[in-house]
Image (spheres, rainbow, N blue to C red):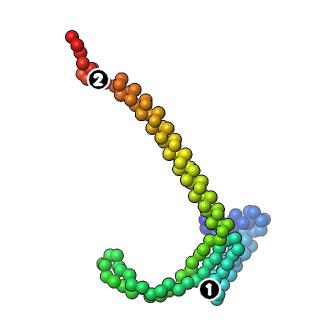
Amino acid sequence: MTKKEIVKTISDEIGLTQLKTKEIVQKTFDAIVETLVEDHRIELRNFGVFEVKKRAARKARNPRTGEKVSVPEKFVVTFKPGKEMEARVRELERRAAAEREAKERAAEAANANGSAAGDHGAMQARSPSDQTSYD
């Protein structure tokens, strides 16, 4: 989903113009970024926590050449989802697993029915040269 789609969804739900909604959404994002720069952390209840962390310098290897390279320390933004978000994502996982199981059961049932029909069909599909004649 893009920012434009978020703006449209919110605009439709609350009845503001897309222009006004876009301004509000952008101000929200700007506030999040500004807080991260100044305070290195922002906690949004029922959503999650964004945090700026320093990643230490390290040695790495160029996968193309195999040469060792130094990677300098840098600041990265991390996100830890809140409990509500975690629960909703876990529900997605449960639904996907249930769908997978249903498809597997359907495939097994189709194979069981198909193999029974396949055996019967194989018996009828013998050519005359395969049949033994007792004259």
Instruction: Give the percent coordinates (x, y) of residue 27.
Output: 70, 79
Q: Residue at x 72, y 66 (%)?
A: 10
Label 2 CA crowd tier, 10 Å (few <14, some 14–19, many 20+) = few
SS for callout 1: loop
- Circle 2 residue: 127
- Residue type at mark 1 is His
Q: How many marks?
A: 2
Which residue is more in the foreground, 62 or 103?
A: 103
Instruction: Residue 6: name its quadrant.
Output: bottom right
Q: In which quarter of the image is residue 84?
A: bottom right
* Identity of the residue drawn at 73% across and 71% down: 21
Q: For the N terminus, which image quadrant?
A: bottom right
Q: Residue 52: x and y, percent?
A: 58, 83
The answer to which of marks 2 and 1 sits earlier in the sequence is: 1
Identify the residue at the far right of this view: 15
Q: Percent position (x, y) of residue 56?
A: 47, 86
Task: Quickly name the residue at label 1.
Answer: 40
Mark 1 burial class by Cα count in 10 Å: few <14, some 14-19, many 20+: some
Task: Look at the image and tell me whether residue 34 can be seen.
Answer: no
Residue visible at 56% across and 49% down in the picture: 99
- Quadrant in the rendering for residue 31: bottom right
Residue depicted at 61% across the width and 62% down the height? 89
Indicate the amino acid at tag 2.
Ser
User: In the rendered structure, are the residues bearing label 2 and label 1 in contact, judged by CB atoms less than 8 Å apart?
Assistant: no
